[in-house]
Each structure stands twice: as structure tokens, then as C-alpha cells.
Image (spheres, rainbow, N blue to C red):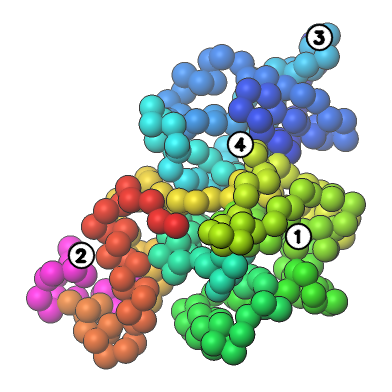
Amino acid sequence: MEQKNGLVIKSTGSRYTVLSDDGTIMICRIRGKIRLQGIKSTNPVSVGDRVVFDDDESGEGVISEIKERKNYIIRKATNLSKESHIIAANVDQAVLIVTINYPMTSRVFVDRFIAASEAYGIPVTLVFNKTDRYDPKHMQILNEWRELYEGIGYKTMAVSAKKQEDLSEFQNLLKDKISVLSGHSGVGKSTLINRVEPSLNLKTAEISSIHHSGKHTTTFAEMHALSFGGYIIDTPGIRGFGLIHIEREELYHYFKELFEFAKDCRFNNCSHYSEPGCSVKKAVEDGHIALSRYESYLSILLDKNEKYR
């Protein structure tokens, strides 16, 4: 039995596809004892994990060790007996595909995603898709959103996966990096990926014309190698993004502009909600912090377990 190192490129719950450092691909299961190491997650092994596995004679490998993660991005699990679901580990950047309409992505969802990424030290880029479908009013909203998030310090871009000829800016964003792509179902993740890497031929789904919401086409997170360098991790469309493992009193740390003003608050333990002498609330009143961002912060602060569409 030979021990090998490798990268988990697909997770289907009980079996993991591992790309060995020698270039071979092995289907692996997990050794039972790893589950006992206090990982309160629905998936102890995640796409992006570096692992040690035994290549046994059965033709199936056995993962015996998960190497230390540099970061990971998680969401609240749908399985109530566990508390989290790790979407991906060891990523260089998180790319959130956002649509102003067809379907509409809520600002609270965007801000929750950004806060979760900030909490785990993962840079975020917002990619606004479906610009070909936007009327002048939608374009005005798009420009306001981009101005807001770029003003805070986040990279944004606007694309049309369906109509745009030149997607080199989007391709350059992904080049030579491990990127996790996320967003609601129907925002065009798979179409965008297929445009820059046609050989992947990921399944896409039409938007329901009645509800303007997407059908789920991705069941499990999967990592795909890019011919121009790097990997993308396509994730199941996320309908709710729960923030966990973030202490209530630390939440404002992950809203960059709130953190900047918070140092001038009267109280060190200010929650920026009801205390007097709060510099954050004054900054909102004076227009230095966008009301939408502050409202997102409060929605998470006051009810962290609520799901947002």
C-alpha cells in the first residue's frame, strides 16, 4: 500500500475525486477516524483540500489525513444536525456572480457573501452578469452598485455571458488562481465558465419565466482545471448564505467601512446598533457609509440564522 499526496477536485458526499501529485486521478473514500476530530461539518473533506491517501489494491483510495487549510469558505448546512457546510478550501479568491435582474440578487446576500469571505481572508470580486438584458433603469442600478462596492475597495466588472464577444477581463481574473465561483442559481455561472473554457461544457439551465429564479444545475462542488492556468470551483447555486463561526461582537470587522469608523465610537464594545456616541451610526447619517450596507450589517447582527434570497 502506497501513500500519496493529492488535491481533492470533486466531492460527492461519500466519495472524493483526488488528483494525485503524480498526475493520476483516484476515487477515494474517507477513513472513519477523520470524522471524529471534532469537525462539525456535513463534509469533513472539501474540494480544494490537500490530502494524504493510501492507494490500495481495491482500486479505491482511502484518505487518511487532511493537510492544514490556509482558508475555507462555508455556508450554513441544510442538515440540522451539523452546523456548517464547507464550500471550498484553500482558495485564492471568491468570485460572486451577481445579477440586477433575471434573477435579482439581493444586497443582503451580496453583503453576507462578502462578510463571510472577509472573515476567512479570501479576496472578493463581484461580477455583474446579463448586462445584455438590462434596460436604462437596470443599468443605472448596476452603476450605483459598482460605484458603492468599488468605493469600499472591492473589484467589480460587468459582463454579458450570452452576448459579449470579449471576455478577456473575466478570463484574466481567473488565470493562475484557485477561484470559487458562487451566486444564486440562474445568474449564469455555468454559461460564463463555458465561454472562457468551452471544453468543460458545464450544464446550464434556462430561468423560470414565472419566478425569475434558476433551476439548480450543479449538485456538488467541483474543481475544474483551466487550460490558461488555474482552477475554478463551481458551487451549487446558493439560496441562503448563513454566517457562522463569526462572533456577534466581531461582525463589524468584516464590513470594511464600518470597521474604519468604529474606532471613534464612545464605547469599545459598541455594537453600532443602539449605543450613544456611535461613530458608525453618525457616518451612516452623514452619508459616509451606505444605508444598504448598514442595513445588511444589522440584518446579520440581529438574526444571524435567517436565510436570505
Image point 81% across, 9% down: which residue? Answer: 58
Q: Amino acid at mark 2?
A: Ser
Mark sitting earlier along the chain (1/2) = 1
Three-letter code, disc 3: Ser
Name which of mark 1 and mark 3 comes first in the sequence: 3
Say which label, 2 or 3, has the lower sequence index: 3
- Three-letter code for the amino acid on which mark 4 is drawn: Ser
Labels 1 and 2 touching (C-beta < 8 A):
no
Numbered mark located on residue 271 in the image: 2
Question: What x and y, as percent, mark residue 204?
Answer: 74, 53
> Would residue 295 appear left or right of 163 to someone viewing this image?
left
Count of marks placed on residues? 4
Q: Secondary structure at mark 3?
A: loop
Amino acid type shown at disc 1: Thr
Q: For mark 1, what is the residue?
A: 191
- 153 versus 36 height, above or below: below
Q: CA distance from mark 2 to mark 4?
A: 34 Å
Q: Residue at x 85, y 77 (%)?
A: 165
Q: Which mark is residue 58?
A: 3
Is residue 183 among the parts visible in the rendering?
no
